[in-house]
Amino acid sequence: MSGQEQDLSSYPPFFLHQSESVRTVEPKDSIPPISDEPDPIPCIDLQHLNPEEIGKACRDWGMFRLVNHGIPMELVTQLQEQSMKVFSLPFEDKQASLQSPITYFWGTAVLTPSRVALREKVHKMSRIEGIRARLDLLPQMTTDDPMFISFRNLLEEYGKHTAELTRCLFEALRKNVGIDHALSKPYLSEDRGFLRLYRYFPCSKPNKEEGISAHTDSTVLSIVNQDQVGGLQVFKDDRWIEIKPIPNTLIVNIGGMFQAMSNDEYKSAKHRVMNKQKERISICYFAAPEDDAVIHSTKYKPFTYKDFTAQVQEDRKTTGNKVGLQRFKPT
Ligand SMILES: O=C(O)CCC(=O)C(=O)O
Ligand SMILES: [Fe+2]
């Protein structure tokens, strides 16, 4: 079944009936993104990591394209197909059957501490659906349903690959910015890593409707695996740049935690996703520090990831926006 022939009962009813409440971009932001030739995003080869190249990419862009990443293409294809099967279940079934450690959300990528979608009164909703998987708890997930067994196994395997490549990247970046080796473990906790899978609703007006609005990621590093539909954009030098889907490549973002750890030498990139004419799937891995590890930075007051995410939640509730690292500037 192609994206366009989807059984509409799998979508949240809101997506089909409430288009006036959907989040669109301001006219000033809706200019078509510039599609540079050749691809302008810095490209990093995981098998031949060059400290200078990766450092420059993180300083100038806060993101890079990763090639030779070691995740088998077959695994990615299988996970994409299996994710599509799960997303294609009737909406009510997804709500009922996706429970911890795999949870379902829709309408926004912003989740509350209990991992349900945060319904911000001030903001419109987005036509996206997501599945969040806690990698540390996946092995304990019990189910008799062959579809969910296969889904869980693929998530686990994919999670192991991304955790491993993230460790390699973190090591290189840590050395680059002079983070002590002793901090490797608390600053990058494999147990806290999680996956988020998204399905973006097809939109008849391309580059008008936001799937995920402009933001920076809060985590240490995030690894985006997008399909061939496109829609991911990065904000650089006052303009939005389309991040082309290139098969078998990943997009790595510096997150707010690494920005602080690097004393702002590396900045987390502002990015967003626009809904396209075709349905889109992405698979994203987020690497987090240990919840209680104190992050020391010359630019910010000492804080933990837990403090940070609590502050983000609080700001979202009160102002509708993420304030982010600014909250932890010394007074
Ligand atoms: O779906 C994507 O391509 C990116 C998602 C994203 O930016 C996020 O979840 O923070
Ligand atoms: Fe993001």
Image (spheres, rainbow, N blue to C red):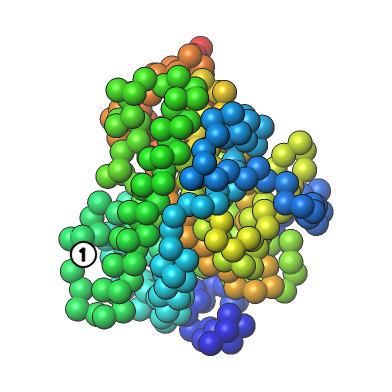
Seen from the viewer's position, the closer of residues 86 and 77 is 77
Q: Residue at x 29, y 32 (%)?
A: 185
Instruction: Name the residue: 24% across, 80% down.
Output: 145
Is the residue 90 above or below the residue 247 in the image? below
Provide the secondary structure element on which disc 1 rests.
loop
Q: Is residue 32 above or below residue 192?
A: below
In the image, farthest residue toward the front: 48
Residue drawn at point x = 64 percent, y = 68 percent: 229
What number of labels is visible? 1
How many other residues sit within 10 Å of disc 1, few (<14), some (14-19) or many (≥20)? few
Apparent side of residue 166 relative to residue 56 in the rendered image (left or right): left
Q: Is residue 67 left or right of residue 136?
A: right
Cβ of mark 1 under 8 Å from ligand 1: the answer is: no
- Amino acid carrying label 1: it is Met
Q: What residue is pinned by disc 1?
A: 141
Quadrant position of residue 203: bottom right
Q: Nearer the viewer, residue 172 or 328?
A: 172
Q: Residue at x 62, y 83 (%)?
A: 4
Residue 220 location in percent, x, y? 44, 37
Q: Position of residue 212 (x, y in %)?
A: 59, 55
Q: Is residue 116 left or right of residue 282?
A: left
Q: Is residue 125 visible?
A: no
What x and y, as percent, mark residue 204?
72, 74
The reply to whether residue 66 is visible in this rendering is yes
Q: Closest to the observer: 9 or 271? A: 271
Question: Where's residue 287, x and y in %?
Answer: 40, 43
In the rendered image, the vertical position of residue 331 relative to residue 184, given as above or below: above
